[in-house]
Image: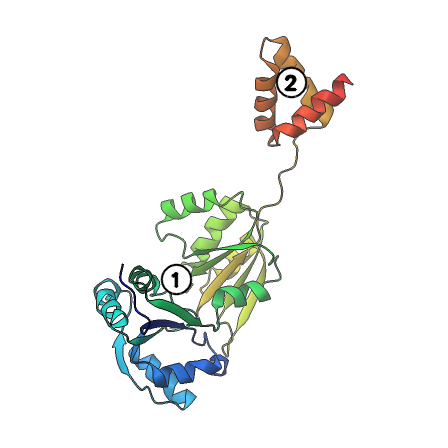
Amino acid sequence: MTGTDEGVLVLAGTPIGEAGDAPPRLAAELAEADVVAAEDTRRLRRLASTLGVTVGGRVVSYFEGNEAARTPELADELAGGARVLLVTDAGMPSVSDPGYRLVAAAVERGVRVTAVPGPSAVLTALAVSGLPVDRFCFEGFPPRKPGERAARLRELADERRTLVFFESPHRLAASLTAMAEALGAERNAAVCRELTKTYEEVRRGPLEELARWAEPGVRGEITVVVAGAEPARPSAEPAELAERVAAREAAGQRRKEAIAEVAREAGVPKRIVFDAVVAAKG
């Protein structure tokens, strides 16, 4: 791996709606960068105009369709000492947007990578959702195909952390319905639409209710926040757990195996069953 002390990749957050939310350093980076890689060059120039700044370097497109092909070219420029600014249409680069490949290529070449922190639909939606924010996970866009989407959501059924998804407006109702089926119709959620924009809307309620609301159609950029799973609760009292173990022991099963089997059936840690057995013998 070869490195350079001169080149630097700057990931810059851009407004997710309100132009006034642009981080103060963004204007300076737009003026000083040797190369500006933008998801949409026209949107970039409109943003620069709004901020009253002239882009000083060369502007190139960097989007899903050309990301793989353009990454080596930009990595070469970084290794040669260029300051490359990466911006996407909204929010932070590489968070469900182009950027990850270029960051990985820069790291591989020993090029410094830094960021201009800015707006994020993930954190904004999480903050206004009214759901727990102490622990969360970002799941990006659910799979488009119904079968794959259902399988992915089933994997998340026991996830205790708050879940954050992106979704397109025309698939929102189907995704919310699938979430209700996999995670529970009464699981609380929030659909955040057009965050920071003129028609911003946050709808909160059970997944089943939100799916019915979205059925007629919804417009705009969508972020969905879903409450995590509730902690598992024992399906039996301690005395009953002890009785189940005793019955298996009477049938010839070893105590250790009986405790493990009863714990699995009841959906509780083995320690809970063990303690119940000890208490019963006491």
Q: In terms of secondary structure, where does tag 2 sit?
A: helix
Residue 29 higher or lower than 181, as above or below: below
Q: Residues within 10 Å of mark 2 (few under 14, many from 20)?
A: many
Check disc 1: other Cα within 10 Å, few if <14, some if 14-19, many if 20+: some
Looking at the image, which residue is at 24% across and 72% down? 80
Of the 4 image quadrants, the one containing the C terminus is top right
Comparing 165 with 277, the one in front is: 277
Q: Whole-Å distance between the Cαs marked 2 and 1?
A: 49 Å
Occupied quadrant, residue 7: bottom left
Identify the secondary structure beneath mark 1: loop
The N terminus: image quadrant: bottom left
Q: Read off the residue under disc 2.
A: 245
Q: In the picture provided, is 159 more to the left or to the right than 278?
A: left
Residue 23 spot, x, y in % from top left: 48, 79
The three-letter amino acid code for the residue at tag 2 is: Val
As rendered, which of 232 and 111 lies closer to the eye?
Answer: 111
> Residue at the spot x=46%, y=65% of the render?
222
Residue type indicated by callout 1: Ser
Name the side, left or right, on which 199 lies relative to 98. Answer: right
Q: Sequence-wise, which precedes: disc 2 or disc 1?
A: 1
Q: Give me the disc on residue 96.
A: 1
Q: Position of residue 109 (x, y in %)?
A: 28, 62
Q: Where does residue 28 sit, x and y in percent of width and height?
A: 41, 84
Percent across and percent down for residue 223 are 48, 63
Furthest toward the right, the residue is 282
Color encoding of the figure:
rainbow
- In the rendered picture of this protein, how many numbered marks are placed on residues? 2
- Residue nearest the viewer, comparing 97 with 240: 97
